[in-house]
Image (spheres, grey):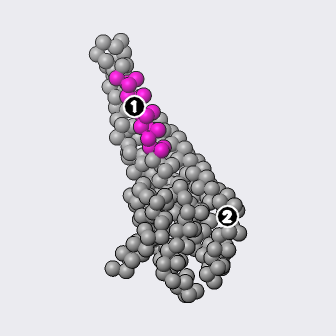
């Protein structure tokens, strides 16, 4: 599976201070480490469930003339790698931006106290603190990091897709997976309804936390039939 993180080089507004560059770099490193951790965690969970249910899952597909390891798992593995890579990036970047905003609020509070009219500091010092604080207040690290990520990994609409913040099944990668699996199963002589049930079984077994109630066979049927319209 594709690993999750490559070093990003964010684009900065100009002019910026060294302190601002360090601030952005710190949260960039934070998000990259978190991205890889979230990616590994998601893939490890799937791997653990597969080890526990491998024999049973293969048998369910074999009963319908399908070799799970050969015909289905490669599609599932590829989809998981691509999706959870993007999902981990979104989750990590959103978390980094949130934590960074909390840090900036602390700076704002400190500057407000220091720059009060009654404070004993020189007017020039107060003005300089306010000026240096502005870039920290204006920066949107979530937008910055996502735009950089999109440039580095190609024009992939899934990186910025709002569906990554919603239910997993709404992501186009899973819709494509369901369509491909259904086609493969039809070629093996499996009826559409049995195909929906097998996909639901796969979701329920390997990624139940991701799909919840929408992995039911009828929900899959509705998604796939809507694609034909």
Q: Is residue 156 above or below residue 66?
A: above
Give the residue drawn at x 34%, y 16%. Answer: 122
Quarter assignment of residue 218: bottom left
Label of residue 53 in the image:
2
| Magenta highlight range | 95-112
Q: Is residue 30 above or below residue 102?
A: below
Q: Which of 192 and 173 is in front in this view?
A: 192
Q: Is residue 226 visible?
A: yes
Q: What element carries label 1?
A: helix
| Residue 225 painted magenta | no
Label of residue 35 in the image:
none
Secondary structure mainly formed by the magenta segment = helix
Q: Is residue 41 above or below residue 76?
A: above
Residue identifier under label 1? 105
Q: Which x, y percent locates residue 90?
A: 47, 53
Q: Which residue lies furthest to the left in this view?
A: 117
Q: Which x, y percent locates residue 63?
A: 64, 79
């Amino acid at each position: 599976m594709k690993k999750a993180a490559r070093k990003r080089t964010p684009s900065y507004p100009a002019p910026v201070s060294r302190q601002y560059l360090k601030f952005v770099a710190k949260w960039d490193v934070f998000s990259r480490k978190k991205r890889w951790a979230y990616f590994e965690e998601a893939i490890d969970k799937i791997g653990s469930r597969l080890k526990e249910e491998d024999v049973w899952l293969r048998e369910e597909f074999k009963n319908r003339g399908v070799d799970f390891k050969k015909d289905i798992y490669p599609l599932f593995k590829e989809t998981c790698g691509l999706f959870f890579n993007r999902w981990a990036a979104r989750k990590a970047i959103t978390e980094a931006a949130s934590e960074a905003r909390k840090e900036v609020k602390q700076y704002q509070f400190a500057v407000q106290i220091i720059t009060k009219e009654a404070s004993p500091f020189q007017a020039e010092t107060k003005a300089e603190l306010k000026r240096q604080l502005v870039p920290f207040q204006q920066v949107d690290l979530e937008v910055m990091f996502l735009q950089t990520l999109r440039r580095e990994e190609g024009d992939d609409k899934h990186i910025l897709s709002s569906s990554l913040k919603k239910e997993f099944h709404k992501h186009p990668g899973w819709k494509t997976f369901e369509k491909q699996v259904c086609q493969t199963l039809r070629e093996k002589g499996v009826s559409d309804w049995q195909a929906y049930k097998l996909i639901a079984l796969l979701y329920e077994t390997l990624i139940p936390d991701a799909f919840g109630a929408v992995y039911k066979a009828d929900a899959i049927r509705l998604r796939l039939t809507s694609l034909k319209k």
